[in-house]
Image: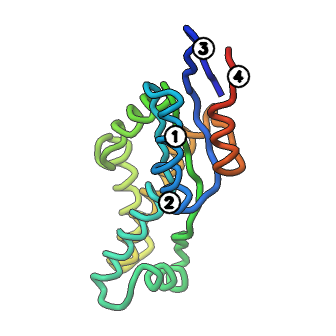
Amino acid sequence: MRIEKTNNAVNFNSIYSLKGNLKDLVHIKNEVIPLLNTVKPDSKVLAIGVDEMFTAPLRQTIGKIAGQTGLGGADWLTQNIKKNYRININLGKKQDIFVFTGEDTAKLDKYLRGRKSPLQSIANEFSIMKDTFVAWGKNLPAHAGAAHIANNFFKREESAFYKFATKDCRKTDNIQHLVAAITKDNVK
């Protein structure tokens, strides 16, 4: 954690991670962040759940693809293509929460703005086309091919986010440890 002290003012400036569920994420956003804002009103604090960013959108996408078949939902489709085509799509929760503070919130904003759309870069377009050709090469039906492409996209984006977020990240055990770590008076 980097805490800078100038003119007796504490500045939060770090990235923290912890395991938690949606209830924990909501608690951090609704109660912990406002508490931290009373300690340092002009220091930004943002919390992001990996499940909120990647697992939920993947589940929704797989659910829409499954709905087009008329045969079942997201769980049915993942089981079906795993059994029939050996494609594994993990819709399980990761339960990783990242809390960005101070200048690291600006870095997060810049990172997220650069990844708004899967088609923003030639590299992403190429990887989607490659996935499409792989799906065709496996002779997959439309629903399995679409699920395969969506899964690969979200896996790439999740991997890129972890690479970004875990750089210089401090792990905390729980919400109490998170608050203690952020507010601890380690002044550089």
> Label 2 is placed on what type of residue?
Asp
User: What amino acid is labelled 1 in the image?
Assistant: Leu
Q: Mark 4 belongs to which amino acid?
A: Asn
Residue at image x 55%, y 22%?
11
**Which mark, residue 186?**
4
Residue 13 vertical placement versus 150 (above, below): above
Of residues 127 and 136, the one nearer the viewer is: 127
Foreground pick, 159 / 123:
159
Residue type marked 3: Lys
Image quadrant where one finds the C terminus: top right
Residue denoted by label 1? 35
The nearer-to-camera label among 2 and 1 is 1
What is the residue that sits farthest to the top in this orientation? Answer: 7
On the image, numbered disc 3 is attached to which residue? 5
Q: Residue at x 54, y 85 (%)?
A: 83
Characterize the local packing of mark 1: few (<14), some (14-19) or many (20 or more) Cα atoms within 10 angstroms. Answer: some
Q: Residues within 10 Å of mark 2 (few under 14, many from 20)?
A: many
Query: Mark 4 or mark 2, which has the lower sequence index?
Result: 2
